[in-house]
Amino acid sequence: MQPHRLGLIVGAIACLLTAGAPALAQQSNAVLYGIWATPKNDGKVAIEPCENGAVCGRVLDGRQLRQNPNQADVLNPDVSKRTRRVMGLNILDGYSGGPTEWKGGVVYDPQTGDSSHDSTLTLTAPNTLVVKGCRLVFCRSETWTKIQNTASNGG
């Protein structure tokens, strides 16, 4: 076989393989999508696709939010963000991977103002997710429980 023809064939195969990658990522991420209960303050987070196809999670509910739905993000270290509402806030942003572990995103805790770029989402069972964030050598994790398979109706 001629070298340039072999290169065309290899290139065509590579295109076919990578063309399906976004669809496979969406299928892999789909196991995460839904409403998750958090152990702190009876919270609920909707995990859903971000605009860029990565995984994000936004605040839907919590004990303090039921008392004050307009609660602001007052502990955010960025003063310009302290007036934004906690309800609907993305606390998980930009994760990719799967089928059982997602990385590369940021986790944010509005209760403390802490965030971590060194974080993972690990599915340990179909309805059990360990959310872990680290700063330097100190790590913190929570175990979330899936309570609904889709986030479409907002809780």
Image: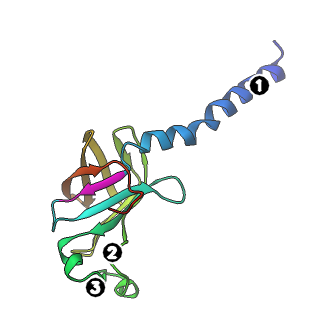
Left or right: residue 10 compared with residue 119: right
Residue on which disc 3 sits:
74
Residue at the image position 33 percent from the left and 57 percent from the top: 118
* The magenta segment: 34-38
Name the residue type under label 3: Val
Q: Secondary structure at mark 2?
A: loop
Name the residue type under label 2: Met
Distance of mark 2 from mark 3, alpha carbons? 13 Å
Q: Nearer the viewer, mark 2 or mark 1?
A: 2
Name the residue type under label 1: Gly
Residue on which disc 2 sits:
87
* Crowdedness near tag 1: few (<14), some (14–19) or many (≥20) residues, C-alpha within 10 Å: few
* Crowdedness near tag 3: few (<14), some (14–19) or many (≥20) residues, C-alpha within 10 Å: some
Q: Secondary structure at mark 1?
A: helix
Q: Nearer the viewer, mark 2 or mark 3?
A: 2
The image quarter containing residue 2 is top right
Residue at the image position 22 percent from the left and 76 percent from the top: 66
Q: Is residue 61 above or below residue 56?
A: below
